[in-house]
Image: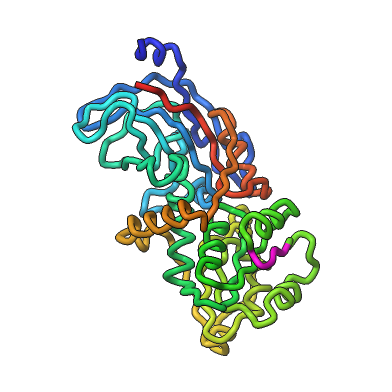
Amino acid sequence: MHNQEQNQEQNQEIVLAKHPSGTVKADTFKFNTIDMPQCQDNEVLIKSLYISVDPGMRGFMDKGDDDAAGNKFKLNKPITSRTVAQVIDSKSQDFKQGDIVHGRFAWQKYQSVSTDHIAKVDPTLAPISTAVSMLGIPGLAAYFGMINIGQPKKGDTVVVSGAAGAVGSIAAQIARIKGCRVVGIAGTPQKIDYLEQDLGLDKGINYKQTDDMTAAIKAACPNGVDVFFDNVGGELFDAVFANINEHARIAICGQIADYNAKNPPQGPRPMHMLIKKSARMEGFVAYDFMEEFNDAKKQIGEWYNDGKITYKEHLIEGFEHIPAAFIGLFSGENIGKQMVKVADIEEF
């Protein structure tokens, strides 16, 4: 019965139609109807359930010859991102029909993948969609950036930019767990409410309604800034940076302010201030800490189950809405992790 149903359903993919110039638009993407995949030895046929869209994918859409890691998306090839999926058919000892898995998969409804590229999701830790949000790369980036680089101590003042997003909201809550005074920067009144009411931050600053951010940071952080977790860059970075304390730690996680810029603006040069304050600034990606992933997931899962961390998903339903969900990231629509729900779990 199941195979007949599957055959009736059309398989679809979303490919990169052209390299965007500046802001990504709908015509950056193209939908194709494709055949149902067959599953070979040591492969599984998977059905996408939750597809994650992240601002950092924007750089992979540009033309690039500098792409040693093979991260750039190719024209007329499917775009890939972190996905939670269900195994529909398996030719592997390690995975069975019905298993929930995650990995970096193509934007397709169905696909067959090698078992080397997938991992099982543990549904007992937290809801399965968190495998690509709180317990995925966003949560891990928040954890390692805050804990390993920020090294927050009780009583420190911590500032997080992009604080209502997938990474920032977890980073800010970790600082709160560590006994810090936490100030979050975001861009809508709803996000400020979320930071102050739902996440319990000491202060939220709406940068879109603030004329002088440097002064606003100074007012919110009368004792200066000890830890700065930056997801945004640009002028917000400059404003927080002007308020850092001696021995401040700055974790550079993202620079969404510049991702769509054809000519990124030239900001102040930080070297002099870093010397003056004996401060440390470090860029990172979550994969720098791969050997610590499992411990971090366990710790985040514990905090979640103890009610110390909450997370929010901005869930959009329907495969056809994936491009719009990605584009929406850059106008600041989402609170929490931007996700697209593509299908429901099947019972086997």
Q: Position of residue 278 (x, y in %)?
A: 52, 87
Quadrant assignment, res 92:
top left
In the rendered view, tell whether residue 314 sits above or below residue 191.
above
Q: Is 205 displayed left or right of 342 in the figure? A: right
Q: Nearer the viewer, residue 344 or 38?
A: 344
Q: Determine the residue positioned at 41% across, 49% down.
A: 71
Q: Determine the residue positioned at 75% across, 72% down.
A: 216
Q: Determine the residue positioned at 78% across, 71% down.
A: 212
Q: Quadrant of the N terminus?
A: top left
Q: Main secondary structure of the magenta part?
A: strand
Residues in magenta, as a range: 201-205
Q: Determine the residue positioned at 37% across, 49% down.
A: 70
Residue furthest front as drawn: 306
Q: Position of residue 64 (x, y in %)?
A: 46, 51
Q: Quadrant of the C terminus?
A: top left
Q: Nearer the viewer, residue 83 or 269?
A: 83
In the rendered view, tell whether residue 44 sits above or below residue 336.
above
Quadrant assignment, res 19:
top right
Q: Is residue 58 magenta?
A: no
Q: Is 82 displayed left or right of 165 in the figure? A: left
